[in-house]
Amino acid sequence: MKAILLNLLCMFVLLDVTSCAKKTVDPGVKENALSINLILPNVAAVGSIVKIQGSGFGSSPEGIQVKFGEVMGEVLDLSDGVISVKVPELAEGSKIDVSVLLGSNTSNVKSFRVRKIGEVVLTQKDTVEWIENKSPNIVAIKAGIPAYDEQVVKYIRNGQQLLEVELSEPVIVAEADRELPWGFFNFPSIRRAVSGQMSISWSMSPDNAESYGQATTGNSAVSDDEGKTWTRVERAPTGGGIVLSNGDRITITTPPAIPLADLELPAPLATLQDGSNYDRIFRIYDYDDLPLQLQGTYQARIKKGQTSWVAERGTLVHPNLARYADGDLFPVVWWGDMEELSDGIYRGTYPTFETKPGGGVDASGVTFYKSTDYGLTWVKQGNIPYQPDLMLDPNGSKRNAFGWTEPAFVALENGTFLSVLRTQDGFGESPMYLSTSTDKGINWSTPKAFTGAGVLPRLLELDNGIVALASGRPGVQLRFMLNDNTNDWSEPFEMLPWVPNEVFSCGYTQFLKVDANSFLVVYSDFWHRNPEGNRRKAIKVRRVTVKRM
């Protein structure tokens, strides 16, 4: 609870009360009005202390009253927009409306339930009963469920509880010892090492093509207790990739980008200018005319029974494929997710450029490949061509170079392929889209915009059938697919607070499955405070357990 309040109070001190309140108050409540934003916990027994966070409370507890239905609670403290109040004598199990009174003013109401004596408490964490209140306008981004600290959230729609989500307290993996620019203490990843340890690594390089394939040290940590504690190490233990049915482990790598001056290249098919404030220029080349070092895939394999990675090259079978140079460098990028099914390995990749029959090159799409020889040869299955929804994505027509980027891909247990696509770029906040395939990646549904913003979506299907989605910017969010419907997602669980024009995180995350109901999620926190109170970047990890009800 203390950490929740510290996060909230940090937002109030650094930004101001009204900037936060307008993201969380009920519709129709004026920005500076007396209002309740959140009761933590909102399920508690008689005599318990609960915290009411809101605005317009003033600076003194004298004169503040809190009503539980028609019964007054005892106000114990008021500090920085948070009232501490004791739950009065009320009927066990009753659901009542809580309001705050100050002078002649009365706040909006928030629901509270009185815990029954003997009621089973799954954990001693704060419990929030969250009643779904989605905005029909996905572009009008609003904050979702505050989930900054350890707590249990009961997700309720139309009076029915759909999910119970238990979030652990954030665990600090590593924190920076000084202020660092973008690209440093960014882009964390988590994996299970060959040794069985958990391993987390993060970037310590500028975020540009010059950094591709450049090794760094000291940017890793390991855990021997399933993520409870972490120790910094000079080099990450061997791990990553996916373990195949033949016992091999395979991963895709990104080699250092090559200066154009060092290459003999054909004439480019097209020159595309990014057009946003990224201001990058891309030259597009016919794949078949490129030098061999710019063809195929760069990857590595640990053979069954071995313990070391061995570099290898994969072959691409993809008619009309083109590749790009970024400024004065030529990277070989084949980023994406892969999964092995009974008939082969499937991989969704970006960025994909293809030559059009009549000439020219469109903004990049996403391509799905299949390998039936354990990753040595990759054959194109199908594409999701760039086709933005200009009603919900006003920047869609401005993207001349990169269209879809950072595709998350998962092959669901029911046979559906699901992909979530990023569009957010130098033009500002832009939607994530989703698309599905029922023929293993050959044909895909028209992408549908379903969030107002988000970068690097991540997907994970747990053994209990629940699908989790992580993304970021603003903040870091978790969502869960509801009713086994790829078009039905929960409101976002806000792992970090967000405020317009403030960057709380790079927004990049990664999952690691722990058991049938649980996973770890790693993320960066740019507003972390070290023991001396200084703001420093940090890498954090949380355990999340989610169950259908």
Image: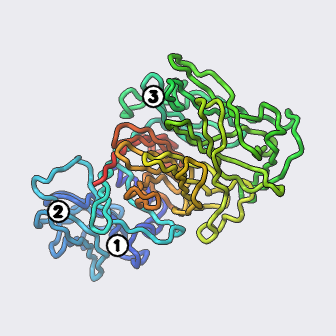
Q: Check disc 2 and report the residue beneath it.
A: 114
Q: Position of residue 260 (x, y in %)?
A: 84, 38
Q: Check disc 3 and report the residue beneath it.
A: 222
The residue closer to the viewer here, 93 or 11, is 93
Vertical comparison of 327 with 230: above or below: below
* Label 3, residues with CA under 10 Å away: few <14, some 14-19, many ≥20: many
Q: Quadrant of residue 512?
A: top left
Q: Label 3 to label 1, Cα distance in Å?
A: 44 Å
Q: Is residue 55 left or right of residue 103?
A: right
Q: Position of residue 119 (x, y in %)?
A: 14, 54
Vertical comparison of 254 with 197: above or below: below
Vertical comparison of 527 with 198: above or below: below
Q: Check disc 1 and report the residue beneath it.
A: 35
Q: Label 2 to label 3, Cα distance in Å?
A: 42 Å
Instruction: Residue at the far bottom: name it.
Output: 104
* Label 2, residues with CA under 10 Å away: few <14, some 14-19, many ≥20: many
**Circle 3: element type:** strand
Amino acid type at circle 2 is Val
The residue closer to the viewer here, 226 or 240, is 240
The residue closer to the viewer here, 131 or 449, is 449
Query: Could you tell me if the residues under marks 3 and 1 are in contact, i.e. CB atoms within 8 Å?
Result: no
Q: Quadrant of the C terminus?
A: bottom left
Amino acid type at circle 3 is Val
**Circle 2: element type:** strand
Q: Residue at x 46, y 51 (%)?
A: 469
Amino acid type at circle 1 is Ser
Sequence order check: which comes first, mark 1 or mark 2? 1
Q: Which mark is residue 153?
A: none
Q: Position of residue 350 (x, y in %)?
A: 65, 46
Tag nearer the camera, 1 or 2: 2
Sequence order check: which comes first, mark 3 or mark 1? 1
